[in-house]
Image: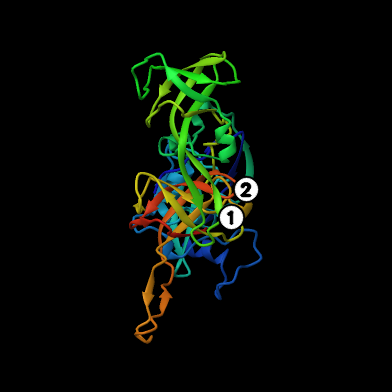
Amino acid sequence: MYKFNCTLIGLLCLMVTPAFATDVDDLVSSVVTPNNTTTTTAAPVLGVSNSDIKKTAPVEYTVKKNDTVVKIAQKYLTKLSLWPTLLGVDSLQSTKLYPGDKLKLISADGNRKILVVALAGQKSNYFQKLTPEVRVEPIKDSDYISVLNLKAFMLDPIVMSKESYNNLPTVVGSSNDLAVYYSIGDSIYVKNYQGNVGDRVYVISDMRALKDPDSGEFLGEEYRLNGYGVISQVDKISNLELTSAPNTIMSLNKVLKVDNTMDFDIVPHHLDHVIDGKIIALYDSLTSTGEYNNVVINKGARDGVEAGSVFDITNGRKFKDPTSNSDDDRYFDAPAKSIGELLVYKVYDKVSFALVTDSQSEILINSKIRSQ
């Protein structure tokens, strides 16, 4: 599973004041009654099922300077979305941890795990109940952890109407009259560019139509990103200097100004409603994919998908009913089993683009997904 990053230190940080418990029983009895119901105490009932805790989870862990919230969460949990339940916070983003904070994992009620936090610098083996208070800390540039490193795995997906694509400026040649394909360092000639010198642009071409595999609904046209460049001269025929060319660039490709709305400081989170969908397209493969690869799903903003939404990937296999008549075979849907996880990072109206952050087995085209 990929190690997402979140802000560890902000201007206002939620910390704890210690209310000491002499042992685990004191702590557990303060939040859980013998019949497993919560008391009216202000302390939250924390914990998740033992089956959701990784077998390799450390019993004790001290937060290090370069740790991130999600990196720590992934040491303990099989699913990232369970972190708020384990720690007793509203979301991943609301977690505030400091280097030196001591984390302890204990068992309560037989099948429940509780994460207990001790203040940085305290020398003790006690457990603490959590009492919120505000602590003010100045923000240091070195303390802020961005998720920009996720960009190395993500694409710059482009979806637009065919009409909009056809109306874009067009690559019509280059400074090298003999070249059929253009590469980094080439000066590319562009017809009908209306922007400004210094604009960062994509060079794109036709790729594929995206359709819903079940309803057949047309969901949009996806275009291939062939390269990046900078406009160095604007005229009837403008000049574009190529800075990157991951795919083949040639005449009749189109030029699109870079969309700066892409937000890589997304926070992985679960949605407040269930969204079921499918993986409808892959990259660099026709049938299957795996961890750290990109996929397209058939759900978008109109369905309530957000950047940062986390989905489970299920196997969704069918099997034959052995009691059915041989002349009239019937098939059952097998119980859904999670075989991976994906993180949405770019959302359009009807489709979204996501990164597979975990896969226990091969991820097939048309695999079912469900929001966590």
User: Which element type, helix, strand or loop, lies under badge 2?
Assistant: strand
* Disc on res. 222: none
Closer to us: mark 2 or mark 1? 1
Q: Tally the numbered discs.
A: 2
Figure quadrant of residue 366: bottom left
Who's the residue at 55% across and 74% down the image?
A: 34
The x, y position of residue 195, in whole percent, is: 60, 20
Q: Is residue 112 left or right of residue 292?
A: right
User: What amino acid type is highlighted by mark number 2?
Assistant: Pro
Q: Earlier in the sequence, mark 2 or mark 1?
A: 2
Who's the residue at 54% across and 16% down the image?
A: 198
Q: Nearer the viewer, residue 56 or 369?
A: 369
* Disc on res. 132: 2
The x, y position of residue 85, in whole percent, is: 54, 57
The x, y position of residue 106, in whole percent, is: 44, 59
Who's the residue at 46% across and 38% down the image?
A: 206
Q: Is residue 310 left or right of residue 250?
A: right
Circle 1 residue:
271
